[in-house]
Amino acid sequence: MKILIADDEKIKRVTLAHDLESHGHEVVTAADGAEALERLDSASFDVVVTDLRMPKVDGIELLRRIKQNGAAGTEVIVMTAYGSIPLAVEAGKLGALEFLTKPFRNDDLLALVARIEARRPSPAAAGTIPESGARIDEVVVGASNAIARVRRSVEVCAQSDANVLICGETGVGKDLLAGVIHRHSSRQGCPFVKVGCTLLPSQLIESELFGHEKGAFTGAEQRRLGRFELAQGGTLYLDDVDDIPLEHQAKLLRAIEDKVFERVGGTASIRADVRIVASTKRNLLEKITRGDFRKDLYYRLDVLHVNVPPLRDRREDIVPLAEHLLKRIAADCPRDVELQSLDILAEHDWPGNIRELFHVLQRVYLVGAGAVTRNLLAAEMKEAVHRRPPPSGPFHSTLERTERDLLCAALSATRGNKTAAATALGIKPSTFRDKLAKHGLG
């Protein structure tokens, strides 16, 4: 879908655009409401995501103008750090689909966009062929033989309807590849729905995947569609499938193998017309040996395979990647970038891979007010090294897992509200965000 994001907070605007693009959507951004209106004058959008408080033209006025101009097919999602019932009521009266209070998880917006997409008729059904967007080689960036093999694997996956397993360390871009495979496949006109398996509380996994009926359990006040139903006709992306507990794998296997499932608390069988793309940061064969992962599920997922090597094993890709990411961060390549200074990036191992590289470049760009110099890069990379977690032996591994579990539990209990989660754990919000980033949850 084509999405417009209007927000004067640059970091939020960039990260939302990045996540939406990695899920196969075409995204345009605006720094305020006036710029958003200019974008709307020159193009039509399926969804507008707008902040409430912005200079020149605020979100409420932007919403009003969209609806006055008769853009009936454009859904508007209003987000703000100043949530209130009167504002929510006003936005609802004007036709807003949803009112999101900051801070919220990007996954919340992604799920909402997926629901909007699921309700829309397929472009193929309307007799048109959807645009495939950027070419694969324009998205999967790099000059190494390793990344060339990844591109070839992605091309094969895009031409097939078989299930795909993407393997690689945290931060190598597995989400991006999943979106590219969907966007270039025969299912491109249908929903692309992501499930972040790491953040799913064990007791809610089946409800998230398959939905539930009203009264199925305490708190189930109405019927809820699961991710399988939201992805009907399209692609269901199981991110970090290695984190799904063993006791829930049998039902997932049946849904994939038989293409049928039931909602929690229901008896009616529902046909699952979805293609599965899954990713893992761990070696699933080792988990099978330990009895932590079902062999039959593994073979159902690993029909086609994409292995993404870490950045430290393909250093010749780091500078081209940095240039590509800077264009995304700045919308177009800023004039104050010293391109020759980017070679310093290839001297580091980047244990956080592309995600860490993106965050370093983003911070340098913001701190330097658009300037990217060797001195700024060197200083930021030094700080990045200090922020990395220490090497983990058995004792540290246990502490790391415990900390990660606490973070996930706090996010679950507060429904993704990071400020409330930090308060529940008795730590500063900034510390909480740093810990999320350390564990790859940010």
Image: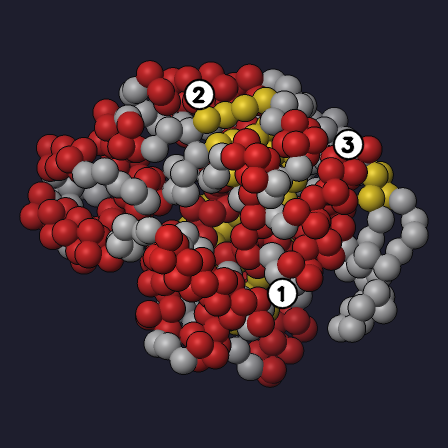
Disc on res. 257: 3
For disc 2, the neighbor class at 10 Å (few under 14, some 14 to 19, many from 20) is many
For the N terminus, the image quarter is top right
Left-right relation of 129 to 360 = right
Left-right relation of 126 to 117 = right
Q: Secondary structure at mark 1?
A: strand
Q: Earlier in the sequence, mark 2 or mark 1?
A: 1
Circle nearer the viewer, 1 or 3: 3
Residue 386 visible at all: yes
Residue 28: where, in percent of width, then height? 45, 46
Q: Residue furthest left?
A: 375
Residue 148: where, in percent of width, then height? 38, 18
Name which residue lies at 32% across and 40% down: 353
User: Where is 300 relative to 333, above or below?
Assistant: above
Circle nearer the viewer, 3 or 2: 3
Q: State if disc 2 and disc 3 touch (CB < 8 Å).
A: no
List the residue tagged with mark 2.
151
Name which residue lies at 44% across and 34% down: 168
Image mark count: 3
User: Where is 393 relative to 187, above or below?
Assistant: below
Q: Secondary structure at mark 2?
A: helix
Identify residue type, mark 1: Glu
